[in-house]
Amino acid sequence: MERSVRGAVHGVPAELIEDACWYAWLQIVRRQDDIILGPSAFRWLHRTAVRQAWRLDARDRRESGPRGYLDMNARQELVDRGPEVVEVVEQHETLRNVQKLPDRQRRLLALHVVGFKTAEVADISGDSILTVRRQLRRARQQMREGLA
């Protein structure tokens, strides 16, 4: 039954699914006079377990915050490392902006970042020095503005 419930409720931790299945079995035992055990009994168990799994998951999310179930020590560690986390996020955004640049600007910027001077970038790309400077300036401006 756990496999069946797991297939119906994606993203719910296994322990909650197990608890939901136990709940369904206990309900059928407790209410055996009300429920006719026949071909539809498994369907009733399945439906009850799925509903309970969603309830348990919702309760767990309310009590422990967003998915990831961070304990207090892990949360405090994230707070302590706040500046590092912010820096990583900013670097990620910068990289995302680089990916949005036109191919030509991205190639020229990559050569420049690796350490080639403007004249060397011009020789490698076949562009004039003025064109390379203009393209690098545009790329930097677009990345600063976040419009890339």
Image (cartoon, helix red, strand yellow):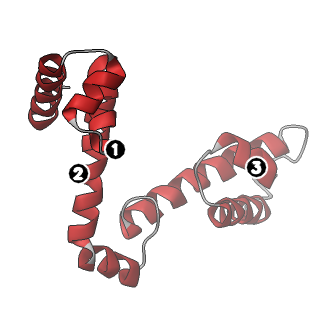
Quarter of the rendering containing residue 19: bottom right
Q: How far apart are marks 1 and 3 (CA)?
A: 62 Å
Mark closer to the observer (1, 2): 1
The residue beneath circle 3 is 45
Give the amino acid type for the residue marked by disc 3 in the picture. Answer: Leu
The location of residue 75, given as percent across then percent down, is: 34, 76
Residue 114's tag is 1
Secondary structure of the residue carrying tag 3 is: helix
Q: Where 54 falls versus 110 (above or below)?
A: below
The location of residue 109, given as percent across then percent down, is: 27, 32
Secondary structure of the residue carrying tag 1 is: helix
Give the amino acid type for the residue marked by disc 1 in the picture. Answer: Val
**Mark 1 or mark 2, earlier in chain:** 2
The residue beneath circle 2 is 90
Determine the residue positioned at 25% across, 15% down: 127
Q: Which of 85 and 148 is in front in this view?
A: 148
Q: Where 63 falls versus 74 (above or below)?
A: above
Determine the residue positioned at 62% across, 63% down: 16
Give the amino acid type for the residue marked by disc 2 in the picture. Answer: Glu
Q: Where 23 falls versus 49 (above or below)?
A: below
